[in-house]
Image: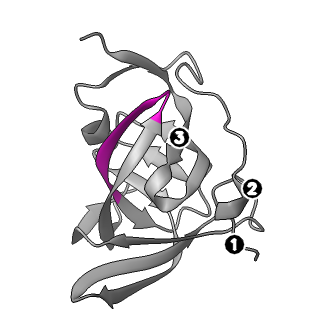
Amino acid sequence: MPQTTLGWREWVTLPALGINGIKAKIDTGARSSSLHAFDIQAIEVDGEQWVEFKVNPQQHETTELVACRAPIKDYRQVTDSGGHRSMRYVIETSICIGGEQFLAEMTLADRSQMLFRMLLGRTAMKNRYIVDPSRSYCASQKPAKSPSQIVPS
């Protein structure tokens, strides 16, 4: 099966989280994928551990909020590109790029000071994609907003 080519940045949809469009950096240097999240709280739902959090899906925009909830898959130590270690919640969620949908693990982290609200790491891309670092948006276009998923700030 031929692999889809991605550029160094792509528009991604996270349908299970109600995020209709988030610009992701396609990062072959990162093992795991990461999503910008804040107001992160672990909760119990029917005897299972879940996490509630909020996302600002658009870069440089803090007024648009999406409230999310997902089962906790893990809580693990992650080392960032600067060598700093932190404990992060890990969720597994559906990711859609260019019409292809798949499940992948994603850590939740404060990425408010980063250029991209999401990183797609190599574990999620393995055996699915080839990355052309000289191109952008090879497999995706900016999706239309889905107002029903947006929580007023």
Position of 110 compared to 44: left or right? right
Q: Secondary structure at mark 1?
A: loop
Q: Which mark is residue 57?
A: none
> Which quadrant of the structure image shows residue 102?
top left
Q: In this figure, which residue is indicated by the disc labeled 2?
A: 60
State which quarter of the image contains the N terminus.
Answer: top left
Q: Is residue 148 left or right of residue 98?
A: right
In 3D space, how far apart are the residues under numbered discs 1 and 3 (Cα atoms)? 19 Å
Residue 71 lies, with reference to residue 41, above or below; the image says above
Between disc 1 and disc 3, the foreground one is 1
Dot 3 falls on a residue whose secondary structure is strand
Residue at the (47%, 58%) spot, across then down: 35
Callout 2 crowding tier (Cα within 10 Å): few <14, some 14–19, many ≥20: few
- Tell whether 73 sits left or right of 45: left
Q: Do tag 1 and tag 3 residues touch (Cβ < 8 Å)?
A: no
Residue 72 screen position, x and y as percent: 28, 72
Pick whichever, 17 or 138, lies toward us.
17
- Magenta stretch in the rendered image: 97-106
Residue that label 3 marks: 12
Mark 1 residue type: Val
Q: Residues within 10 Å of mark 3 (few under 14, many from 20)?
A: many
The residue that disc 1 covers is 151
Q: Is residue 102 magenta?
A: yes
Q: Tell me whether the residue at label 2 lies in contact with that at label 1, contact meaning CB atoms closer than 8 angstroms.
A: no
Q: Nearer the viewer, mark 3 or mark 2?
A: 3
